[in-house]
């Protein structure tokens, strides 16, 4: 019987670096994934740029949510947080719920005010006021929230609240539990509880790796083969214009994780890992900034090639958010940390 008191996770430096670099790379990938304009895979042209853009937006970075979800499940169950529900709930309210409500609530209010005076070409129409639409926009009750990437946080928060039950399944009947979970969520028997059906499966699989204490390096010797398989699958999606990427997403953590073994001991890998602390903040706020950047770009569209905008926008948005983060940590307060789920200890370090 595992110790029911939560414990500090201890990794060797290599595994910690690999987790951190993957977090930052996946978040940067999400920014690329959401850079306007989205083109359905069926409508992708045959030019080099069209294919290049589709390769990353319709294939490669579709792995981001499954990879991050698997890591989240692994870290939660490795720390034994599911044993202490009170600590778990308090921690996740601070680190997930408050940032989610802050970013969605403020954005929903701002969007409502803007739409009351101007026409704004976005999918969410909050004006005129409708209680159901506003609740969905601010809270994501039955569909994605107004800050659309944050459906991930919404679903992750629900999964963390379910983690004591998932932990019982993991420890008593791990693989039967996986089958049960797959049936419930894959066939949508949960209703609106979870919006992304693969997230519970990946979260639970991360828990399996943690509880069973599987060797995280067992596929490292096949790292090159894994990444070749992954990229080949991605190329196939683009070439054959495959709409359903569900199966790529399900296998992507298994194929992507070994590749980190090739980076973790390099200068580039360590540089990426050091930027993991910015990841959550970037994730929270990148979508509104990308939308704003595209609205600005449209004013210069006759003079600036779209290809230049698409390549530059992710770097500009990430660079701007990193700068805002640093300023917030340097001149901010404890409230800055609370609103964006940043551990208060970082504010103390930044102040020294």
Image (tube, rainbow, N blue to C red):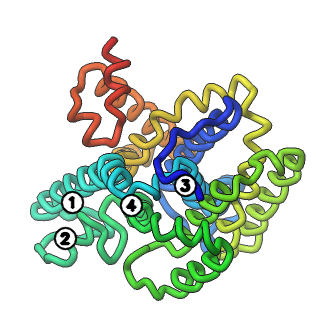
- Tell me which residue sits at (54%, 51%) in the image: 3
In the rendered view, does 258 fall on the left or right side of 175?
A: right
Instruction: Decide which of 91, 142 is in the foreground and name it.
Output: 91
Disc with the residue nearer the chain's start (2 vs 3): 3
Q: Is residue 194 above or below residue 235?
A: below
Residue under pointer 3: 77
Mark 2 or 4, which is nearer the eye? Answer: 4
Residue 116 x, y percent position in the rendering: 10, 64
Instruction: Decide which of 125, 338 is in the foreground and name it.
Output: 338
- Furthest residue to the top? 352
Mark 2 or 3, which is nearer the eye? Answer: 3
C-alpha distance separating marks 3 and 4: 14 Å
- Furthest residue to the front? 1
Disc with the residue nearer the chain's start (1 vs 2): 1
Q: In this view, does 280 lie above or below 212?
A: above
C-alpha distance separating marks 2 and 4: 20 Å
Image disc number at residue 134: 2
Image disc number at residue 108: 1
- Count how many numbered circles sit on residues in the image: 4
Q: Is residue 41 above or below residue 290?
A: below
Q: Residues within 10 Å of mark 2 (few under 14, many from 20)?
A: many
Residue 215 x, y percent position in the rendering: 77, 49
Image disc number at residue 157: 4
């Amino acid at each position: 019987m595992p110790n029911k008191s939560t414990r500090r996770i201890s990794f060797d430096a290599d595994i910690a670096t690999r987790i951190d670099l993957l977090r930052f790379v996946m978040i940067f990938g999400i920014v690329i994934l959401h850079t306007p304009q989205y083109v359905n895979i069926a409508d992708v042209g045959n030019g080099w740029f069209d294919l290049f853009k589709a390769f990353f937006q319709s294939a490669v970075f579709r792995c981001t949510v499954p990879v991050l979800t698997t890591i989240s499940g692994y870290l939660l169950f490795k720390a034994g947080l599911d044993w202490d529900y009170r600590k778990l709930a308090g921690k996740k309210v601070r680190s997930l719920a408050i940032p989610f409500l802050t970013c969605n609530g403020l954005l929903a209010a701002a969007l409502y005010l803007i739409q009351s005076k101007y026409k704004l070409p976005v999918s969410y129409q909050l004006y005129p006021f409708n209680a159901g639409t506003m609740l969905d926009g601010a809270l994501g009750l039955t569909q994605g929230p107004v800050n659309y990437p944050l459906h991930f946080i919404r679903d992750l928060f629900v999964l963390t609240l379910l983690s004591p039950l998932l932990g019982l399944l993991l420890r008593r009947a791990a693989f039967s539990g996986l089958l049960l979970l797959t049936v419930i969520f894959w066939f949508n028997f949960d209703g609106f509880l979870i919006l992304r059906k693969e997230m519970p499966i990946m979260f639970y699989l991360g828990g399996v790796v943690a509880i069973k204490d599987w060797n995280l390096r067992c596929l490292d010797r096949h790292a090159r083969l894994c990444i070749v398989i992954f990229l080949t699958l991605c190329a196939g999606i683009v070439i054959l214009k495959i709409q359903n990427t569900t199966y790529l997403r399900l296998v992507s953590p298994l194929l992507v994780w070994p590749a980190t073994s090739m980076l973790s001991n390099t200068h580039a890998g360590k540089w990426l890992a050091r930027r993991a602390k910015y990841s959550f903040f970037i994730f929270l706020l990148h979508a509104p900034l990308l939308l704003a950047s595209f609205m600005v770009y449209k004013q210069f569209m006759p003079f600036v090639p779209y290809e230049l905008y698409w390549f530059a926008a992710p770097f500009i948005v990430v660079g701007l958010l990193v700068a805002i983060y640093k300023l917030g940590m340097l001149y901010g307060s404890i409230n800055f940390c609370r609103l964006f789920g940043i551990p208060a200890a970082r504010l103390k370090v930044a102040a020294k």
